[in-house]
Amino acid sequence: MMSDTWPTEVIPDEDSLFMRVHRNYIKDGQPIPGTFRNHGEGDQDGMSTDWSKYSTAEQTKQRATNPLWQGGVIKMRVEKVREIPQQKVQHAPLDDNRSHTNVKGPKDTKTRYLLMRSWEWAIQFNSSETA
Amino acid sequence: MPKHFSHFATFEEEDRSTGQLQNCPGWNFPLRETLPAGFNIHSTRATQEPKAFVTPLELGQLVSAIILMREQISQLRDDLENRIPKKPAKSTRTARSRENQGTGDQGKLPLVPSELAIISDAIEASRVIYHAQQSSDDEPGLICSERTWRRAAKTLMDHALAIWEKARLVVKVPMISAGPDNSVDIYWTSAPYGLLLNVPSDEKKPTTYFGDDSTNSNSNQTSGQLVPAKRLDMGILMWLAHTAA
């Protein structure tokens, strides 16, 4: 559900999006293509990310609700995401997270492939943490 | 008739004046002038003691010499074998493929050449995507069925094998992972080329793929569908050949 606290803004192309990647979705030091998927319903349907204007990579990591959560944080340039057919970057602030942004559009094979081409680590997952 | 002709006389009477056997007119045989040593030919019965050529002492020396020669030959053979460079092992088909476990032909892996063992190993290691067990404090990961995994493994191996047989190229080891809706993703990246192949859980639906050249993504890309009835796809084959080592 959209926030009443924060206004919805237009996100410029030059900004970035942060996204948590759980360790179950990391293989050989990189996210698996299945990382890029939609969550939620209605207004909040889409791939959940945080806008760099109101969040750092570390804050994105700390937003994991499970205290035992383990994984990394990736970063994607908004312009790159918008270049992918049918993908729309929409600011969707939540009461407790002004940075929340959805990437809407189907996550088919082509989209997931192109998203695999557009990320970089903001906080790399260290697999030794799991030991 | 001389004594040594007596045996012949029991079979064929020879006309001494013409040198022909009576039953074989026209066959001219030379007259025998010497006795065969030890045994009369055409007979198993000894007619006289064989002549001894060597003494027991000489025989012992001969046996010793033969044993010594055999040892020397054996040593020479070993030396030669060590000097000849070893030929690389011939390409052989390995028994890495796993037997189908009652899932029909779709899940059956072909026998593969040893050069493709890295692909077989990657497939084998990817079994975890349907074996994965998560603890309760974990975020649930993507999973797929063993049946879907087998179809994905076969699709991968069929294409890798076709490229090997046609071009003697070994495709790069892909990342094999569970995808959305219990599907399986097979992802290659070999700068600047890449390819993502998605095998759906529904056997009636086609496998979809997309790949590009990151240096020229808009004009140099491939995409398509591999329908269940088809084993190989030319678009996948051509793109995978780019990623081959």
Image (spheres, coloured by chain):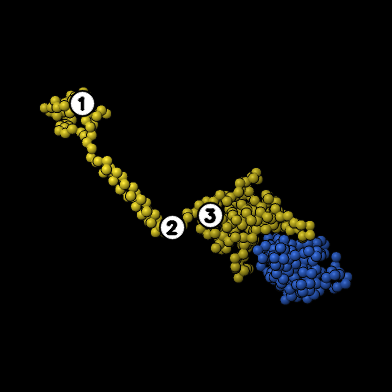
Chain colours: A blue, B yellow
- What residue do we see at 21% from left, 30% from top? B48
Do the dots labelled 2 and 3 sit on one chain?
yes
Residue B226 appears in the rendering = no
Q: Nearer the viewer, mark 2 or mark 1?
A: 1
In the depicted structure, whether residue B60 falls above or below residue B38: below
Say which residue label 1 marks. B7
Q: Quadrant of residue B211?
A: bottom right
> What's the residue type where badge 1 is placed?
His
The chain carrying label 3 is B
Q: Residue at x 69, y 55 (%)?
A: B129
Q: Residue at x 66, y 67 (%)?
A: A117
User: Residue B224 at what x, y percent from top left?
Assistant: 63, 58
Distance (Cα) linking label 2 and label 1: 62 Å
- Residue that lies at the very extreme toward the left in this rendered image: B17
| Residue closest to the eye, B228 or B53 | B53
Q: Residue type at mark 3?
A: Ser
Q: Is residue B135 visible?
A: yes
- Residues packed near mark 3 inside 10 Å, few (<14), some (14 to 19) or many (20 plus): some
Image position, residue B9 (x, y; %): 19, 24
How many residues crowd around disc 2 within 10 Å: few (fewer than 14), some, or many (20 or more)?
A: few
Q: Quadrant of residue B86?
A: bottom left
In the rendered structure, the answer to whether residue B129 lies left or right of residue B119 reads right
Tag 3 secondary structure: helix
Dot 1 falls on a residue whose secondary structure is helix
**Chain identifier of the residue bearing label 1 in the image:** B
Asked if labels 3 and 1 touch by Cβ distance under 8 angstroms, the answer is no
Which of the labelled discs sits on residue B86, or is there none? Answer: 2
